């Protein structure tokens, strides 16, 4: 005697779908928080690493220059310093640093939340062992001039300010301090879930007067 095959009933289909739905929801309940945590940790790491790279560029650049060559914008959003020649960096006769016609310019664009680093040739023809500096007008020209030596070195920067010891950058008094804050949205645009860091670095460039 052969048994006739039995089809699947509607109730069995509904029960199966319900079980699949429950298992899927349980997996999502575990997966979604993990992804959110991953985004937060990645955002925190990116924010912190970006701040440290920016501070290092500021610190090393100024330590390898001279105080007499530094210019800071009144807003504290831009700074320039004269570069030292690479080969050779010092005069064989006097031992003084040989200054390059190029200036390093570090500036912040608030509307873009980005910090740029640029090498700007001033065209200076003065003695190589005598430092020079950019006027505020020259600094603005350097920021606005096109150059293939312009690099983005900071993204998602919501605060950028350079100050000196007394807070008045018209007459510089070391040390020079850079304060930056980086903030990254770890979810999506318009969401308040974000990671941020505020860090500072202070440096005292060399001076011919010392």
Image: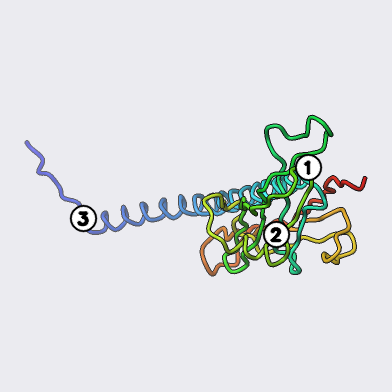
Q: Which residue is at the front of the view, 115 or 120?
A: 120
Instruction: Count every numbered label the image shows and give the total.
Output: 3
Q: CA distance from mark 3 to mark 1?
A: 94 Å
Please give the name of the residue rendered at 54% of the width and 70% of the height, measured from the top-left corner.
190
Horizontal side, residue 132 vs residue 17: left or right = right
Q: Which residue is at the front of the view, 33 or 54?
A: 54
Horizontal side, residue 1 vs residue 100: left or right = left
Q: What residue would you read off at disc 2?
A: 181
Q: Are marks 3 and 2 in contact (CB under 8 Å)?
A: no
Disc 2 element: strand
Q: What residue would you read off at disc 1?
A: 129
Judge depth for marks 3 and 2 and give the one in front.
2
Horizontal side, residue 20 vs residue 79: left or right = left
In the depicted structure, whether residue 86 falls above or below residue 177: above
Give the mark nearest the N terminus, 3 or 1.
3
Q: CA distance from mark 1 to mark 2?
A: 37 Å
Counting from the top left corner in percent of width and height, residue 49 is at 65, 46
Counting from the top left corner in percent of width and height, residue 47 is at 64, 52
Q: Which residue is at the front of the view, 81 or 7?
A: 81
Q: CA distance from mark 3 to mark 2?
A: 62 Å
Disc 3 element: loop
Q: What residue would you read off at disc 3?
A: 9
Q: Residues within 10 Å of mark 3 (few under 14, many from 20)?
A: few
Judge depth for marks 3 and 1 and give the one in front.
1
Q: Residues within 10 Å of mark 2 (few under 14, many from 20)?
A: some
Give the mark nearest the N terminus, 1 or 2.
1
Disc 1 element: loop
Please give the name of the residue rendered at 81% of the width and 56% of the height, measured from the top-left corner.
177
In the depicted structure, whether residue 46 falls above or below residue 14: above
Location of residue 18 (image quadrant):
bottom left
């Amino acid at each position: 005697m052969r048994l006739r095959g039995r089809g699947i009933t509607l109730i069995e289909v509904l029960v199966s779908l319900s079980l699949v739905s429950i298992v899927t929801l349980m997996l999502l309940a575990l997966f979604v928080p993990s992804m959110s945590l991953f985004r937060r940790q990645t955002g925190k790491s990116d924010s912190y690493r970006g701040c440290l790279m920016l501070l290092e560029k500021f610190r090393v650049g100024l330590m390898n220059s001279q105080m007499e060559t530094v210019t800071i914008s009144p807003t504290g959003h831009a700074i320039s310093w004269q570069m030292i020649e690479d080969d050779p960096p010092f005069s064989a006769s006097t031992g003084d640093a040989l200054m390059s016609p190029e200036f390093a310019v570090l500036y912040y664009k608030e509307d873009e939340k980005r910090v740029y680093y640029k090498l700007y040739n001033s065209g200076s023809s003065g003695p190589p062992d005598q430092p020079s500096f950019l006027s505020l007008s020259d600094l603005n020209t350097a920021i606005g001039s096109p150059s293939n030596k312009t690099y983005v070195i900071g993204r998602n920067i919501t605060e950028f300010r350079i100050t000196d010891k007394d807070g008045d950058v018209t007459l510089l008094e070391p040390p020079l301090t850079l304060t930056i804050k980086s903030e990254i949205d770890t979810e999506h645009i318009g969401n308040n879930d974000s990671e941020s860091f505020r860090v500072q670095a202070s440096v005292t460039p060399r001076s011919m007067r010392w």
